[in-house]
Amino acid sequence: MKPDPRDRSLPASTEDEAVLLHRVAQGDRHAFELLYRLYYRRLTRFLQQIMRRPHLVEEVVDDTMLVVWRKAAGFNHASRVSTWIFAIAYRKALKSLKRAHRHVELAWDAEEGYTEGPESELIEHEVHRRLRRALDTLSAEHRAVVELTYYHGYAYREIAQIVGCPVDTVKTRMFHARRKLKALLGGVRDAPL
């Protein structure tokens, strides 16, 4: 059930998401379908970055949304709906990776930007390639903090809720991730960190 990005029936605000979740808690299947469509792409991207196991991502997205369906009534409004859902996805991803007994890596889906010609495109491609390699050297915990901060726009407090640790731990992980990335990318100009 992949979402159609042109679907205009998707909610536009966090208040709408809370209303949808309330309707899901009451067993409203249509509300659940809308919530699923709203989160499918975001969760897929996040999980691809954390897991680097494309064959597991779809399963973890579905497992996450199954928990949302079953536990919607237990949502206590202590955080945003998105924070609650991403926290579920993060825990499900870590459990899935533990079951797989494999080394955890981060897949990096570099976004293409505006380029002025073949030379600048080649330089940008090289920067993204080096950044992907550098991110691959980080632990899953450090990659999660980087991904949630820079690509999903979460604040440290929300990230702490998602990954289940104190805010100071999130700050420490970000400090060490940036320091390692800076050391690895020392010669790269305009790297996005």
Image (spheres, rainbow, N blue to C red):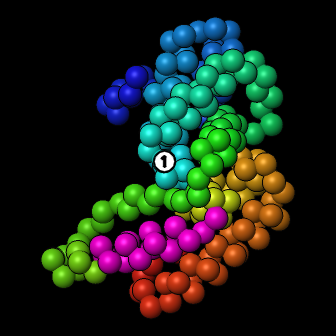
Q: Is residue 133 above or below residue 105?
A: below
Q: Nearer the viewer, residue 96 or 48?
A: 96
The residue under label 1 is 53
Q: Secondary structure at mark 1?
A: loop
Q: Is residue 119 above or below residue 40?
A: below
Q: Nearer the viewer, residue 39 or 139?
A: 139
Q: Is residue 138 found inside the magenta-colored segment of the image?
A: yes
The quarter holding residue 17 reads top right
- At 30% from the left and 73% from the top, the residue drawn is 125
- At 41% from the left and 86% from the top, the residue drawn is 189
Q: Is residue 20 visible?
A: yes
- At 63% from the left and 59% from the top, the residue drawn is 140
Q: Is residue 56 above or below residue 25?
A: below
Measured from the top left, where is residue 101 in percent x and y?
Answer: 63, 49
Where are the magenta residues, as a range?
A: 124-139
- At 82% from the left and 65% from the top, the residue drawn is 168
Q: Is residue 120 left or right of residue 12?
A: left
